[in-house]
Image: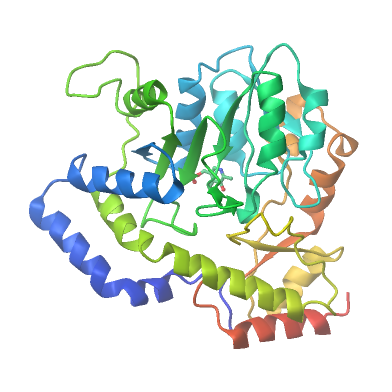
């Protein structure tokens, strides 16, 4: 049996008529930048998350950079980020001339909020919690610390559309939230796409200007911005896909439950989930194995595609070599990067496929 890591073709087959129809309408209207389709998407996504303002942009990396810029983060500032994430969380800080200050992750793979305070200095301006793999960070605790030290909070929600804590969605806890709609995300476009959400009206205006060459209306360039607009085709596709998001999340949660049950006797540690008040939307289903590389190869030989998110923790990437960090500085992130393996989890994954994957893992000698 062959199991791909993701199956976007199957998702397309499910939506084919709706998608083709919406693309046709955009092409026929010949309007590709700005306008009603974008506004519709922004309204619907803001509503879905529970935020007042949504500003669509070109991708999740730009979203982070624009959010930091809108908060006035600049050279000399420090921003606390988890040691395990996709590069964008760190590079967005570095590209503004500020310093990413890495904080180790906890057993849930997310920023360890108990380790935040020891990293705070007079230069610290903000925290970027990342709801990694789809599981919310301990936001109540993080927000209490942020308030105490007057730090701004940007939630990196690139992997956690729809996740919530006691019904309050991630993206509504901090000052600004950033999202990615990279094709493989739980809500993915057919190319790059992103969004920035906030409840602050002035911040929303600054963000909108920063992503659209400093203008709100044509030629009204009040600040130096960039071109990071979402295009109409992507917004139209996202409008269709958004209608299916909750149902897709439910499927992912079911798949994760099946994996958890079937992997109980295996050689891998299943992902730990927080208290039941914390919903996990399983963008990724990440197990741990001391024999990770051999297991990955073993599964590959049996037709099962897996991935590693991420093989090198942020402080140890070549671009941050100049900090000279040692494994003991971030023991969890370092250890996890050697042990984590992402198993296939996509909406059309079947029980037979999950059964096959878990059977192969159980047969793995280690
Ligand atoms: C945690 C995290 N942050 C930021 C990004 C950046 O998003 P994009 O790829 O849309 O630039 C991603 C996307 O992979 C991500 O997973």
Pick whichever, 296 or 209, lies toward us. Answer: 209
User: Residue at horizontal 61%, vertical 40%?
Assistant: 87
Tell me which residue sits at (66%, 54%) in the image: 278
Quadrant for the C terminus in the image? bottom right
Residue at screen point 36% across, 76% down? 14
Q: Nearer the viewer, residue 204 or 188?
A: 204
Res. 236 image quadrant: bottom left
| Above or below 253: residue 326 | above
Residue at image location 81% in from the left, 33% down from the top: 115
The x and y percentages for residue 224 are 35, 16
Q: Quadrant of residue 323?
A: top right
Residue 188 locus on image (x, y percent): 42, 57
Look at the picture and state if 174 lies above or below 345.
Answer: above
**Residue 316 in sight from this viewpoint:** yes
- Choose between 209 and 135: the one closer to the eye: 135
Which quadrant is home to the N terminus? bottom right
Left or right: 19 as drawn, with respect to 102: left
Q: How many marks?
A: 0
Can residue 100 be seen?
Answer: no
């Amino acid at each position: 049996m062959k199991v791909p890591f993701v199956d976007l073709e199957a998702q397309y087959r499910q939506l084919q008529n709706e998608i083709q129809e919406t693309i046709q309408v955009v092409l026929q209207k010949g309007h590709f930048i700005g306008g009603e389709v974008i506004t519709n998407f922004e309204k619907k996504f803001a509503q879905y998350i529970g935020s007042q303002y949504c500003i669509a942009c070109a991708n999740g990396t730009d979203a982070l950079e624009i959010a930091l810029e809108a908060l006035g983060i600049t050279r000399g500032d420090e921003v606390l980020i988890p040691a395990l994430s996709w590069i964008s969380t760190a590079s967005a800080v570095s590209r503004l001339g500020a310093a990413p200050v890495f904080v180790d992750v906890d057993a849930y793979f997310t920023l360890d909020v108990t380790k935040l305070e020891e990293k705070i200095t007079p230069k610290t301006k903000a925290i970027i919690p990342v709801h990694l793999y789809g599981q919310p960070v301990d936001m109540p605790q993080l927000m209490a610390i942020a308030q105490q030290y007057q730090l701004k909070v940007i939630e990196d929600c690139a992997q956690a559309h729809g996740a919530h804590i006691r019904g309050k969605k991630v993206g509504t806890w901090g000052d600004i939230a950033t999202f990615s709609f990279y094709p493989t995300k739980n809500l993915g476009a057919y190319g790059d796409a992103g969004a920035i959400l906030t409840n602050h009206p002035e911040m929303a205006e600054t963000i909108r200007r920063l992503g659209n060459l400093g203008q709100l209306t044509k030629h009204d360039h009040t600040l130096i911005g960039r071109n990071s607009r979402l295009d109409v085709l992507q917004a139209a596709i996202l409008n269709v896909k958004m209608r299916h998001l909750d149902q897709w999340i439910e499927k992912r949660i079911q798949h994760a439950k099946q994996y958890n049950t079937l992997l109980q006797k295996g050689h891998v540690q299943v992902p730990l989930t927080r208290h039941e008040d914390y919903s996990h939307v399983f963008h990724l289903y990440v197990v741990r194995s001391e024999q990770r590389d051999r297991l990955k190869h073993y599964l590959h030989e049996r037709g099962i595609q897996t991935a590693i998110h991420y093989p090198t923790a942020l402080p140890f990437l070549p671009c941050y070599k100049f900090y000279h960090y040692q494994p003991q500085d971030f023991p969890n992130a370092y250890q996890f990067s050697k042990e984590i393996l992402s198993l296939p989890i996509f909406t059309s994954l079947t029980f037979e496929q999950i059964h096959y994957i878990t059977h192969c893992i159980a047969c793995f000698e280690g």
